[in-house]
Image: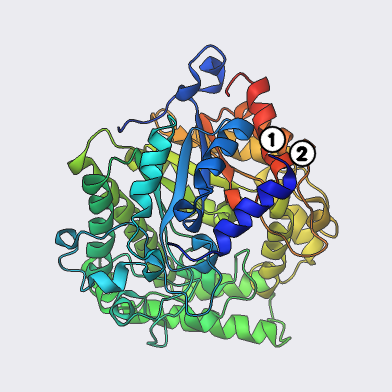
Amino acid sequence: MNRREFLRITSAAAGAALAGPGIMLGDAAAAAGAPRRDTMIGMPISTAPLGQPGFERMLDDMKARGGVNALFPFIYTHEQHRAGIESPGFCGGNFAIPHMQYYEGSGMTYEDMRAPEAGDADLLDRALTLCHGRGMKVFAWVIEDNNRPRIAHWEPMYEIDIHGRRSERNPAGRCFNNPLYRAFTLGLVEDYARSYPIDGIMWGSERQSGVLDVLNISQSSRVDPSRTTCFCEHCLRKGRDQGIDPERARQGFLAVEKFILASRAGQEPRDGHFTAFWRILLNHPELLAWEGLWVRSRHEFMADIRRRVKAVNPELPVGWHIWSNRSFSPFQRAEEDYADLAPFSDFLRPALYNNCAGERFRNFAKGTQDSLYGDIPPAEAFGMLCQQLGYNEAPYDRVSAAGLSAGYVEIETRNAVDGVAPAPTRIWPGVDIDVPVSPGSSKCTPEGVKAAVKAVFQGGGHGILLSRNYIEMKPEHLSAAGDSLRELGLA
C-alpha cells in the first residue's frame, strides 16, 4: 500500500458516516526467543473505521507494518476526535450495544448511551470478529470525555466547583464518589466483560486533583482557578466522615484562587510566590487533606472497576492509561504513585509521547509562573524541573521545536517498571507516532520513532502501544516502529 492509498483509506474511515481472554506477558529479555504473541504490540484506533469496508485492510496494514497484535478502539466516547467523526450535531456514546440490565442505579437510558452515529451496527462485535480472525486481541478502551455531553442524564454525575457550580469540562469531570457515575462505569465494564469476548479493558482519565488544578500546575493552558472541584454532596459527606472540615477546605481553595488571580494581574506577593502559597497551606491544612480525599477516591474507583471485571472473569486483564502530565509534574507523580496503583493493575500504559511532549512540557513549565515558581524565570523553572525529573533535554526556548528525546521514554519506562515492582503489573508505554502538534513544534521522523520504540525496551518495558491513533499515523512512521520491533525480535 502506498502513502496515497494509506491516507485515502484512513481519511475516509475517519470522516464517513457509519453504516478469549488472557493477559499478554513477555519481557524484553525473553522476547527474542518467545513467540511473538507473548509481547504486547497494541494499536489504539478511533471507532469510525471499525464500521468501514476498508477496516480489514487497515488491520492487515498495521499487522504488516507495525507487527500489531492487539487493537484498542475508543469504543465509548462523546469526543469527535476519538470517534473519528467530525460533523455538526455529533453525539457519540457507546459504539457497542448497551445491555440495560447492567446499568441499574445510573439513571441512564439506552438513548443516553448509544451512539446514534453507529446506526444498527455493533462496532465492538465487528472488531472482535475481524481481529480474532487475524489472531489479534481486542481491548475495550474507555477514556473519560474532556467535555460534558449535552445529555440531560449526564449532568448530575459531574463535579461541583468551589463556587457551587456544576462542572462543564476539563480539568473537572464526573465525580468518582457520585453513585450515578459509579453505577454507570461499573455497569459499562461489566457489560463489556459479560456481553463480548474481549481480551481486556483499559480505562483512562486525563485530569488531576484540585490543588494542582487551582495552581495551574498542568500542561493545559491557564486553568480557571475558580472552577476547582469537587465539593458535591457526596464528597462533602465523605470528607466529614473522614474528619475533614469541608468549609475549611473550601476557604483554602478560595485563598489560592485569590493568590493566582492576583499573580495573573501582575501583583507580586510581598514575600514571593512560594512563601505566599506555603503560608496558605499553613493557614488551611485542610487543603492537603481534601487533596488526599480526591486522590484516594480516584484510586478506590479504579480498584472497583477492576474488582467488577474480575467478578465476571478473573483472567480478564484490566489496566490504566496514565496521562502524560504525570511525566512532567513532580507533584502529580507524588499523588499517582505507581506503587499505589500496582495492587489493582494488571497493566499500565503511561503516555510517553516524546515528540509532542516538548511543547507540552514547555506549557507545563510556563503554567507554574502563576503560582509556585512565579519567582523564577520560566527557562530556569524548566531547567529545575528537568533536574527534579532526571531529564537531559533541549532548553526551554528550543524544547518545543526539538521535542523530548528517546531518553525521556527510557527514563519514564524504567520509572514505571521499578515503581510497580515486585508486583506482576505489566508496563506497556504508549509512544508518539504523529500525535498532532502546534505549528513550529517538533514533527515525527522515522529515525525518531525507531529510537523511541527501542527506548521502551531499553527501559525494561514489557510491551508497547503505538500511539495515539492509527488514523493519524503516516505509513512510513508506522513502518519505522515495526522495523525497530523486528530488529528487537519482538515482531
Question: Residue placed at 38% from the left, 53% from the top?
Answer: 123
Residue 115 seen in render: yes
**Residue 93 pos. (x, y %):** 37, 66
The front one of 43 and 207 is 43
Say what secondary structure mark 1 lies in: helix
Where residue 446 is drawn, which disc sits there?
2
Q: In front of the other: label 1 or label 2? A: 1
User: Is residue 38 found left or right of 299 in the rendered image?
Assistant: right
Residue 121: name its quadrant: bottom left
Colouring style:
rainbow
Question: Residue placed at 72% from the left, 67% from the top?
Answer: 366
Q: Which residue of the protein is positioned furthest toward the top in this rendering?
A: 33
Residue type at numbered disc 2: Pro
Residue 318 seen in render: no
Question: Residue placed at 74% from the left, 54% from the top?
Answer: 358
Say what secondary structure mark 2 lies in: helix
Q: Give the spatial CA distance, label 1 vs label 2.
A: 8 Å
The front one of 253 and 313 is 313
The front one of 277 and 453 is 453
Pick the quarter of the image with the C terminus: top right
User: Is residue 441 found left or right of 96 in the rendered image?
Assistant: right
**Residue 245 pos. (x, y %):** 30, 76
Say which label, 1 or 2, has the lower sequence index. 2
Residue type at numbered disc 1: Ser
User: Is residue 388 found left or right of 347 in the rendered image?
Assistant: right
Where residue 144 is drawn, which disc sits there?
none
Decide: marks 1, 2 in contact (CB < 8 A)?
yes
Pick the quarter of the image with the N terminus: top right
